[in-house]
Amino acid sequence: RVVVAALMILLMAGLLPLDRTVSIPAVLEAQDRASLFAPAPSKIRTVLIQEGVKVDAGQPLFVLESPDLDRRLETIQERIAGLEVRLQREASYQEDRDDHQVVWETLRGEENELEGVKALREQLVIRSPFSGIVTDLNSSLYPGRWLNTKEALAHVTGQTGEVIHAFATEEQHARLVLGNEGWFYPDDWMRPARRGWIRDLRQVDEAQVVVPYVASIYSGSIPVRQDGQGVLHAEHSVYRVELNVEDDLLRWDQVIRGVIRVEGRGESVLGRLWTRALSILIREGGL
C-alpha cells in the first residue's frame, strides 16, 4: 500500500502544472528603426549629422560619390548619342533604314539603363526615411573613405513607441497566450524592467534570424550557424513573439538585449516530456 500510495503521489505530482513563468531571449527597440547603408560601392563626400541629433523625414544625412557610377553614366550617354545620330541619318543611309527597329530597341534599352544609373546616383544622397533620432553613428566615417554596401553607417530611431521582439522555442511557444502580460529585463541590470503584453505570436518558425542581437555568435542565447552569404540560421526552431511596451514615459532610443518573463499556460513534467517527444517524432519524421 505504501508503494502504491507513493506511486500515486508521484503520478499526481507529474500531472500538476509547473511554474507558469516562461523566460525568453528578447530585444527592446523602437517600432520604427532603420539601418542606413551605401546603395553602391562609393566613398564619403560629406557627413551631415552627429550622434543623437533629431532629423526630419527626407533630410539628407550623408552625401556619397561613386566614380564608377559617373563613368557608367558617361558611357551610356555616349552610346545614346551615337544611336540618336543613326536614327537621324536614316534618310541618307540605307543601312541605317534597314536597322531602324534594332537601333530603336537598343536606344530604348540604353535609356532605361540610364534612368537606373541616375536613380542609383540620387540614392548616394542618403536621407532619413522618417522623423527620429540618429543612433549608432559609425565613428569611422570621414570624407574620402570608401564604403561597401554591407557596412551600416547609422540608424534612425523613430519616436512612435517601442516594441519587444522575443524568440521562443517550440515548447515555449505552445505555452504562450495572446494578450498575456510580460516583463522585459535588460541584460544591463542598471536599467529598469519594462512591462508589456503579447500582441503577436508567429505560427511559422523563423528560417533566418534577422535580429543578430539574440544570436550566439554575437553573445546572444540562440544557437545559430552562419552560411557563406552571412545569413544566420537557428540551430533549432524559434518563433517570433512581439510585445507592446506599455510605459511610454521611458525611452532608450537604442536596441537593448534582455529576457522577457511571461505568464504562460501551466505545464506538468509528464506534459513537457510528451510535448518534447512528439516534437522530436514530427521533426525526425519530416511531418
Image (tube, rainbow, N blue to C red):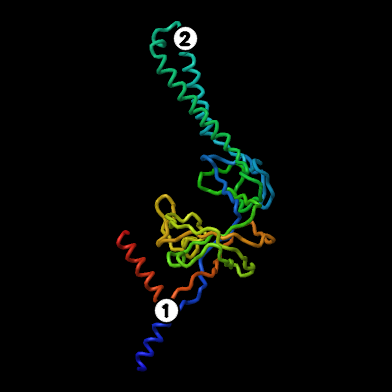
Q: Is residue 210 above or below residue 109?
A: below
Q: Is residue 48 left or right of residue 3?
A: right
Instruction: From the image, tell me which residue sits under label 2.
Output: 89
Rendered-image quadrant of the N terminus: bottom left
Q: Quadrant of the C terminus?
A: bottom left
* Mark closer to the chain start, 1 or 2: 1
Q: Position of residue 144 (x, y in %)?
A: 59, 41
Place residue 59 in its image quadrant. top right
Residue 95: % across, % down: 39, 10
| Element at label 1 | helix
Residue located at (60% from left, 63% from top)? 196
Local packing at callout 2 (Cα closer than 10 Å; few below 14, some 14-19, many 20+) is few
| Furthest residue toward bottom | 2
Q: Can you tell which mark lies on residue 167?
A: none
Give the foreground label among 1 and 2. 1
Residue 93 sits in quarter: top left
Report the front residue among 97 and 74: 97
Compared to residue 286, the image places residue 272 above or below, namely: below
Three-letter amino acid code at the position of disc 2 = Arg
Q: Residue at x 30, y 61 (%)?
A: 285
Q: Give amino acid for label 1.
A: Leu
The local crowd at label 1, few if under 14, some if 14 to 19, many if 20 or more residues have their Cα within 10 Å, is some
Residue annotated with mark 1: 15
Alpha carbon of mark 1 to alpha carbon of mark 2: how far? 91 Å
Name the residue located 51 percent from the left edge and 34 percent from the top edge. Answer: 68
Tell me: 280 left or right of 177. left
* x then y, percent, for residue 284: 31, 63
Most extreme residue toward the top is: 92
